């Protein structure tokens, strides 16, 4: 598995750090971590940078994670990039909606590094 | 979540009410059986379990329920998340600045102790996760309610006044020698 360029999208800087740390604890070889605090910032970064993986919150100001995924899939270079939603909103309707918009996976907060490993690493191998 | 902050002589009163809003708002009318399930729950116990789960996984620390008589907590740090949908109300967490900074430090690693901004951010996220975990524990509620973005208040001499005006449930925990109070105000 090659070193990964990762985008972490969350309005909490603390959560962005924890997610980044969890990726490394899960054994992911991280080449670069980009951070965005909302969907709009994340879209700009996704247009300008080749990415191997995106992890995104849902409830964020300006543009939420669901709208971000919907617009991301319209960017040709990002159509196949795995996107995992990490959020407190873990109801079945939210999961179905996120997956139907193009998300690749879903992790509920609070999460363990083991959950990151189980649900994120296979997406990079696939 | 609507907020109104009004200044009184040497005090600040913060009035909060929750309405359906945000990306989950369209789901709030979908759970026909949610209200019946909601009525059968032990709110305080579910709130306590949600709090313990968040601290064990994200903070790496155990919470113990404060023994009776519960010591007086004079908080100067509070976080709130509104719940709107089949269940309407407010989840709030209150503690001291010192405790909030300790929580942030444990979440981030001890080398980052002292960052006030990190404490606000971390404490808001803790409240957000407790509210989300609590919602997920109640049968039928996960899709029937939306959560607001967290609000964090710090400073001395404030009163939290929820417009829910219904049931109030509260658990006070001990966390590494500090007191931490988690409460749920339900709309009547």
Image (cartoon, coloured by chain):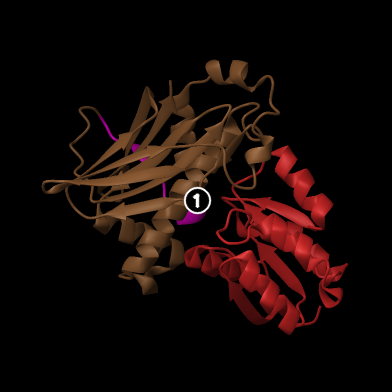
Chain colours: A red, B brown
Indicate the quadrant where residue B64 lies.
Answer: top left
Residue B157: within the magenta?
A: no
Instruction: Please tell me which residue lies in front, B93 or A67.
Output: A67
In the image, is A49 to the left or to the right of B159? Answer: right
Residue at (69%, 26%) from the top-left corner?
B31
Q: Position of residue B149 (x, y in %)?
A: 50, 50
Q: Mark 1 — on which chain does it sit?
A: B
**Residue numbers of the magenta segment:** B54-67
What secondary structure is found at the residue carrying circle 1? loop
Residue A28 visible somewhere in the drawing: no
Q: Which residue is mark 1?
A: B149
Image quarter of residue B27: top right
Name of the residue lying farthest toward the left: B9
| B81, above or below A79, in the image | above
Q: Is residue B47 visible?
A: yes
Residue A8, percent across and down? 63, 69
Which residue is pictured at 19% across the width and 44% down the height?
Answer: B74
On-image quarter of the C terminus of chain A: bottom right
* Residue that appears at 75% across and 78% down: A51
């Amino acid at each position: 598995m090659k070193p990964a360029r990762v985008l972490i999208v969350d309005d909490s800087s603390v959560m962005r750090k924890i997610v980044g740390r969890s990726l490394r604890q899960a054994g992911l070889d991280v080449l670069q971590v980009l951070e965005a605090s909302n969907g709009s910032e994340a879209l700009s970064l996704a247009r300008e940078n080749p990415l191997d993986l995106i992890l995104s919150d849902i409830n964020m100001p300006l543009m939420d994670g669901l709208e971000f995924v919907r617009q991301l899939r319209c960017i040709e270079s990002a159509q196949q990039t795995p996107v995992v939603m990490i959020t407190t909103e873990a109801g079945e309707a939210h999961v179905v909606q996120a997956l139907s918009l193009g998300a690749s996976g879903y992790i509920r907060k609070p999460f363990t590094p083991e959950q990151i490993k189980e649900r994120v690493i296979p997406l990079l191998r696939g | 979540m609507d907020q109104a902050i009004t200044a009184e002589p040497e005090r600040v009163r913060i009035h909060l009410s929750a309405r359906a809003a945000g990306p989950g708002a369209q789901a709030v009318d979908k759970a026909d059986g949610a209200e019946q399930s909601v009525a059968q729950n032990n709110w305080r116990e579910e709130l306590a379990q949600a709090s313990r789960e968040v601290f064990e996984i994200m903070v790496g620390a155990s919470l113990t329920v404060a023994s009776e008589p519960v010591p007086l907590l004079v908080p100067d740090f509070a976080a709130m998340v509104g719940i709107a949908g089949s269940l309407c109300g407010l989840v709030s967490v209150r503690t001291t600045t010192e405790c909030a900074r300790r929580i942030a430090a444990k979440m981030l690693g001890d080398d980052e102790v002292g960052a006030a901004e990190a404490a606000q951010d971390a404490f808001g996220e803790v409240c957000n996760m407790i509210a989300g975990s609590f919602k997920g524990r109640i049968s039928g509620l996960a899709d029937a309610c939306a959560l607001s973005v967290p609000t964090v208040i710090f400073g001395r001499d404030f009163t939290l006044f929820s417009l829910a005006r219904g049931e109030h449930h509260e658990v006070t925990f001990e966390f590494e020698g500090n007191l931490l109070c988690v409460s749920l105000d339900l709309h009547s």
